[in-house]
Amino acid sequence: MGRAFECRRRAKESRWATMSKVFPKLAKSITLAAKNGGPDPETNAPLRVAISNAKAQNLSRENIEAAIKRAAGKDASEISEVNYEGKGPHGSLFFIECATDNSNRSVTNMKTIFNKNNGQLVNSGSLDFMFSRKTVIEFSVPEGRDLEEMELELIDAGLESLEVEDGTVVITGEFSSFASLCQAVEQLGIAGVKASLKRLPTQPIELTEEQMQDVEKILDRIEDDDDVQAVFTNIA
């Protein structure tokens, strides 16, 4: 009984540790979306999606509302979006999106992470051509829906591809089609939708398990940084 209790305690601590990292990032993404496009999710598609993603991660309604209100405050005006690019071991490449109120702190943190893990931060724009920015929308395969029919309905909204991976529908479209694709999926009445703007590698590479361990050391440290909103790699 003591061992079972200990396992539950560790699982709870692990869950809380994850929440303490994820929740501030979700709140910051809501604040940025509201700052850039206004506080009304009905007319601000990125905000609507940020709220939906936050709810899927169990961020409370109070925290969501507070994040929207924060967009009109002084703190939000000091937050800027900054991107960093880096090279890691075994040909790995990283594109890092940050939201920060102190770019000097952010760039110092990124440099330290790469320098300590056999990598280097490179000049902005150096790796931009190695990634293609895309709209990516995911949801569980809906029961009783014809996927081919759904695909046809979404083409006019900017759909490029529709694939099914392990029971999940993955929709990809151009970066500029984010709002129209999100709206089209909403109109289909599909629940549990997760939407994001991703940078997909134009020349993905495959690494061995041993090589991945080296890369994951950098990846884990980047993702732990409070300023980091998203990180993309060229690993298949």
Image (cartoon, rainbow, N blue to C red):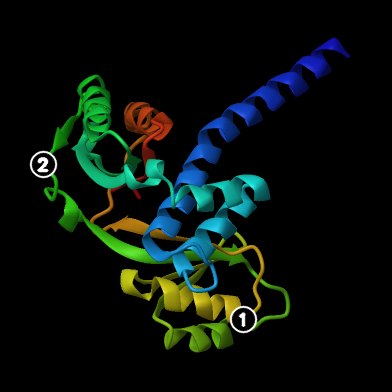
Q: Residues within 10 Å of mark 2 (few under 14, many from 20)?
A: few
Residue type at the position of mark 2: Asn
Closest to the observer, 192 or 227:
227
Sequence-first disc among 1 and 2: 2
Quarter of image, res 114: top left
Residue to which mark 2 is pinned: 123
Closest to the observer, 38 or 152:
38
**Residue 236 % position (x, y):** 35, 50
Residue to which mark 1 is pinned: 188
Residue type at the position of mark 1: Leu
Query: Hey, which residue is sitting farthest top in the picture?
Result: 2
> What residue sits 82% from the left and 18% below the top?
4
Closest to the observer, 141 or 78:
78
> What residue sits 53% from the left and 67% below the top?
41
Say if 130 sits above or below 117 in the image. below
Quarter of image, res 34: bottom left
**Residue 63 % position (x, y):** 61, 45
Judged left or right of residue 222, residue 84 is left
> In terms of secondary structure, where does tag 1 sit?
loop
